[in-house]
Image: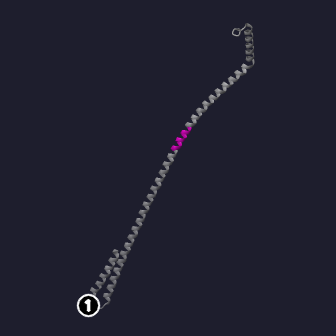
Amino acid sequence: MDLVKPDIGLIFWMTLSFLILLYILKKFAWKPILNSLHEREHTIEDALTKAEQTKKEMAGLVADHERLLTEAKAERDVILKEAREAKDSIIEEAKERAASEEQRLLKIAREAIQNEKMAAVTDLKNEVAAMSIIISEKILRQKLDNGEDQKKHIEELLKDVDFTKNQYSASASS
């Protein structure tokens, strides 16, 4: 039972050695240990503060990234819209030019047809006039003694004129 009940001397020396150990620790070890703990606490607080700042910066960067992405999409849409409008205006302009060119060519063709028609009519009139002169000359050159020969000759000339007239009307209509 002596082990269970300590002796006063043992308690005194144990307390004295504990106090000496406590004094030595306080004098040499507590300050550096506490300073290390305070530094460690400061380092952890700084790291937490920096992590919080970094987290805020990252949130700001994500917001900026999303804003830039939205702006880029809007700009892309504007560019695509402008490109579509330019394409449509170019197509419309080409259609207008083609229609204008078509109208111009049709006008030229109509004028050419009208000119050809007028030239054909003029040629026909000239031919009729020339034939009339030729007939008149033949009538005047021929000596017509009797009236019956004159009638016969005029009928032959009229048949020639009708035949020639039919040829010209057939060629003019084609």
Q: Taken as a whole, is the magenta stretch helix, strand or loop?
A: helix
Give the quarter of the figure containing the N terminus: top right
Q: Position of residue 145 (x, y in %)?
A: 27, 92
Identify the residue at the far bottom of this view. 145
The location of residue 126, given as percent across then percent down, is 36, 79
Location of mark 1 (residue): 149
In this rendered view, identify the residue nearer to me: 132 or 111. Answer: 111
Q: How was the colour assigned to the protein in this rendering?
A: one colour
Q: Is residue 97 above or below residue 117?
A: above
Instruction: Name, please, the residue furthest toward the front.
Output: 1
For the C terminus, which image quadrant? bottom left
User: The residue under label 1 is which amino acid type?
Assistant: Asp
Closer to the camera in the image, 57 or 159: 57
Is residue 65 located in the magenta-colored stretch of the structure? Answer: yes
Q: Give the image location of residue 108, x and y in percent.
A: 42, 67
Corner quadrant of residue 4: top right
For residue 121, which quarter of the picture? bottom left
Residue at 30%, 84% (x, y): give it.
Answer: 160
Secondary structure beneath disc 1? helix
Q: Residue at x 34, y 80 (%)?
A: 129
Residue at 28% x, 88% y is 153
Q: Position of residue 11 (x, y in %)?
A: 72, 9
- 40 on left or right of 110: right
Q: Is residue 65 above or below residue 5?
A: below
Picture layout, residue 167 above or below residue 38:
below
Residue 167 shown in magenta: no
Q: Residue furthest top?
A: 8
Left of 7 or right of it: where is 174?
Answer: left
The segment highlighted magenta reads 64-74
Residue located 72% across and 22% down the image: 32
Question: Label 1 neighbourhood size at 10 Å, few (<14), some (14-19), many (20+)?
Answer: few
